[in-house]
Amino acid sequence: MHNILFASLLLIITLTSCSPSTALTPTVIRSASPTARILVNTSHTPAPALTIGPSTTESPSPTAFNSLNSPSGEFSANAYFEYQLPSGMPAIEILDKEGKLIWQIPFQGEMPTSDPHKSLDIFQWSKDSSQLYFYYVLFPDGGDRAFWWTGFDLQTIDMKTGKSQHVLPGEGFMSFTISPDGTQIAYTRSQDNPSIIYIRNLSTGSEKTAYVIFGSKNYARVGDIHWSPSGKELAFQTESDDYIVQTIYLNLVTMRQKVIQEYKVFDIDFQGWTSEGKLEFREYRNSFSEIVQVDVSKNEMVIIGTPTRSP
């Protein structure tokens, strides 16, 4: 993805004030108002646990559409569509390192008859392999590729007890991602108007929340959340009804936000964080594209290499 770095193409652009009514050009960094309102919510109580018993079925299963080994290597999780299993319902099977089936997570509720319908899927393992995060997703045919919501109804299952519990509140679509050290989760909810970004401590349930900058806009989506390698910063995206996208930086110490890029859908792709803690974008110009990195701490934008022809 990266081209050879040429020092002669170094661009340094100073961050300037951002207005919610002014569109930015793709190569300009704009700062946002530092007065975003901050809320604190520590009152959430996890939903009652759902006990999931061990499966007694020992017959071979078909090829899973999603499989994930635990970090310790003790377990593996496999997710299946409804048409792959005799029950006619989606399920996740968890096996030990010998391949023995120890837990089966069934589809909760009734299967909808319309398409697209939700399916049960694996999200990720906890760092210590003691829990598996799972959730429900839609597999739409087409749609906006910019940032679909991650899914909904995120839960965990305990490897020792087989009990599961809900992780996040809310009934609608969400975007969520867990911090690099596994201690926090950042999420947004489609039901919130104005839009809010939440940072939850997974152990205590305490939260820090902030209204998404320029929350008066009618955002169609707020999500595509990325943790920095240090776990002290976030970047996420918004999209308005007129297909204008903003990539927003959030400092988790101050809870202040700033708009890094503003552009039309398909003009730029946000790639996430580099290992050096920079934000990376691929910008498309006519039939060419180029990689641009933003160092928020230094207020610098750097173009990497020479433009390459887009596929």
Image (spheres, rainbow, N blue to C red):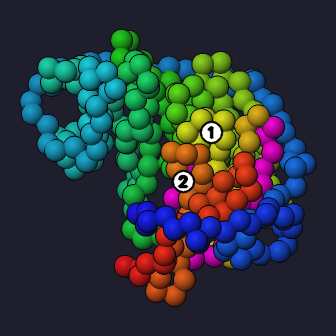
Q: Nearer the viewer, residue 238 or 235?
A: 235
Q: How far across and down, in percent of the image, does residue 308 sit?
A: 43, 78
The answer to whether 127 appears left or right of 196 in the picture is left
Looking at the rendered structure, the kind of residue marked 1 is Ala
Q: Quadrant of residue 185?
A: top right
- Near mark 1 (Cα within 10 A), the count class, few <14, some 14-19 or many ≥20, is many
Residue 181's place in the image compared with 112, above or below, is: above
Residue 272 circle label: 2
Extreme residue in the right direction: 35
Residue 115 shows up from this direction: yes
- Does 225 sit above or below residue 79? below
Query: In what quadrant of the picture does the N terminus appear?
Result: bottom left
Q: Quadrant of residue 32?
A: bottom right
**Residue at figure coordinates x 86%, y 67% from the top left:** 19
Region of the chain picked out in magenta, as a range: 254-273
Label whose residue precedes the other's in the sequence (2 or 1)? 1
**Magenta stretch: helix, strand or loop mostly:** strand
Identified by mark 2, the residue type is Gly
Question: Picture coordinates of residue 147 (x, y %)?
Answer: 54, 60
Residue annotated with mark 1: 186
Q: Which mark is residue 82?
A: none
Measured as percent of width and height from the top left, residue 15 is found at 79, 62
Residues packed near mark 2 inside 10 Å, few (<14), some (14 to 19) or many (20 plus): many
Query: Which SS class for mark 1?
Result: strand
Per the image, is 264 magenta?
A: yes
**Looking at the image, which is closer to me, 133 or 12?**
12
Tell me the element at label 2.
strand
Q: Residue furthest bottom?
A: 286
